[in-house]
Amino acid sequence: MLVKVSAFDIDINSAIFDYQAVADLAAGVTGIVFEENRTFYFDTAAFPGFCVGAIITVKDQKSFCTLDVGGAAGAVIKVNNLDEHNQIMDFNFFALNIENGIGVYQHYHQSAPLSVLERLLKVQVRTEKERRIAAAVAAEEARLGKQLSASQASKIQRAHKSYLKVGVIVRPETLRAQLEEYAKIKGMEYTYTVLTPQVLDATPLSNRIKKKKETLIFTNPNLVASLAREIAGAVQQFGISRGNVTVEDGGGVTRHIKIMDMPEVLWEQEYETVVALIDDINPNDFANNEYLKSLVELFDHPDYTPMLRANV
């Protein structure tokens, strides 16, 4: 089984949160257990400029089977019981560049998908947003000496409006194949960085812009094969080097596919090689985690630095 490291991207649209704020929120809940016996560890101090972390998923399993093939009787199934101090687990390590929101995520078959990290971060952002809204409403009511009207409260809520998306990064050349794996393709966002005469002609205030971002919502997201083919064709035709496609998997979970000219797998090793690297480490001891250090070093790898440290 191969352990892979892939790039991902965090997209934040907020007047109150930036990448540093999200990283600080995550570090503030390090050690939290979230969803299916998963413990999340975060740190923003061990590697300056980065938020690093680990997801440890403990399996509800008290025994495991092996196949003994060395006996005279031939192959024999053996059941091995775990004692109370040992648990079977999966692991995911990751590192986020706080400056641009691009990160690397280590994963393998049956380990936690990237969407698990997204759900936790969304919960933390939403919780902090609601706390700030409540504090702002209370402060304004104290100043005015009366309860705010619905319109006044709504104005405060709009000022705190925030959303966060976490998406895997795929290359334009493999986009079609990636999209065809999903149950639905809901929409697409993309940015024109080269404004051709045709783009400018279709753009209001075209003489005052340097980029143009467009959002498409598809009328029938179930036409996966057609949409995947047409999206991939449009990306090639219009030279879209960066964009975001919103999809839904077979389980009804919404995911975000980031388009960027970057290899989809930055690093891969056999599982046995990787577990030897993390043997006997404390997942909360980031400063002395050599395996995690190797993930951070990918940001300065000559093949990946232009992408992982891109000014986006």
Image (cartoon, grey):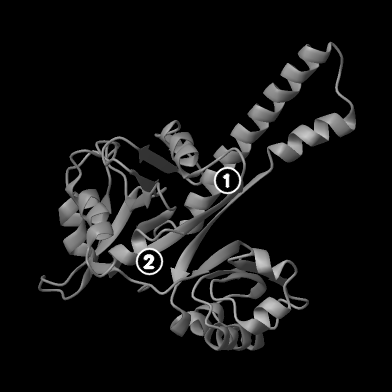
Q: From where the camera sits, is residue 113 visible?
A: no
The residue where tag 2 is placed is 109
Q: Residue at x 58, y 40 (%)?
A: 125
- Could you tell me residue 187's position as x and y percent? 67, 71
2 and 1 marks in contact (CB < 8 Å): no
Indicate left or right for 282 with 140 as reference.
left
Circle 1 sits in a helix, a strand or a loop, which is it?
helix
For discs 2 and 1, the disc positioned in front in the rendered view? 1
What is the quadrant of residue 214 in the picture?
bottom right
Above-or-below relation of 299 to 194? above
Of the pair 93 and 98, the residue shown nearer to us: 98
Relative to residue 97, is residue 308 depicted above or below? below
Q: Is residue 206 above or below residue 236?
A: above
Give whichever of 230, 178 is nearer the camera. 230
Q: How far across and how far down the image is residue 136, in percent?
A: 70, 24
Mark 2, Cα crowd under 10 Å, few <14 / some 14-19 / many 20+, is few
Question: Mark 2 belongs to which amino acid?
Answer: His
Who's the residue at 33% across and 71% down the image?
265
* Residue 252 visible in this rendered orientation of the protein: yes
Query: How far across and down, in percent of the image, does residue 69 sit?
Result: 15, 72
> What residue is disc 1 on?
122
Secondary element under disc 2, as helix, strand or loop, is loop
Q: Residue at x 73, y 66 (%)?
A: 205
Mark 2 or mark 1, which has the lower sequence index? 2
Q: Quadrant of residue 145?
A: top right
